[in-house]
Amino acid sequence: MLKAIIFITLKESVLDPQGVAVKNSLHTMGYQTVADVRIGKRLEVVLDTMDLQKAEEDIRIMCEKLLSNPVMENFTFEIEEVDESAICSSNLSGI
């Protein structure tokens, strides 16, 4: 099995009000060295395949068509091999 770890972030040209709020709060807490904060998302998608090339293509298409908003967001991903026993058994199919 392969696991894709996907990172979705706002494009630099897009204002990140949540990031600004976090930065201001960190400054209030005394962390004056914080210059910028950008908030993003991290997703994990497990694929029942060992075909790395197909997995990369599928993940790229998933990100372009559903998981990210290409107008406002960028995405990157990495894919790693995982043992089936490492997959959380609480992730039941169909729920």
Image (tube, rainbow, N blue to C red):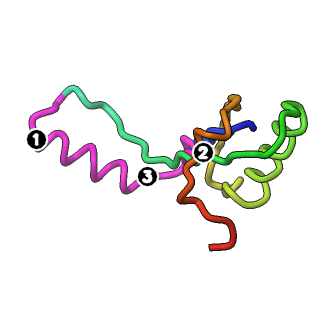
Q: Residue at x 57, y 54 (%)?
A: 89
Q: Residue at x 69, y 46 (%)?
A: 46
* Disc 3 target residue: 16
In the depicted view, which residue is nearer to us: 87 or 77? 87
Residue type at the position of mark 1:
Met
> Which structural element holds mark 1?
loop
* Disc 1 target residue: 29
Mark nearer the N terminus (2 vs 3)? 3
Which quarter of the figure is the N terminus placed in?
A: top right
Q: Residue at x 65, y 42 (%)?
A: 75
10 Å crowding of disc 3: few (<14), some (14-19), many (20+): some
How far, Cα to Cα, is label 2 from label 1?
Answer: 38 Å
Mark nearer the N terminus (1 vs 3)? 3
Mark nearer the N terminus (2 vs 1)? 1
Kindly report which numbered mark, 2 or 3, lies closer to the viewer in this rendering: 2
Span shown in magenta: 8-32
* Disc 2 target residue: 87
> Which structural element holds mark 3?
loop
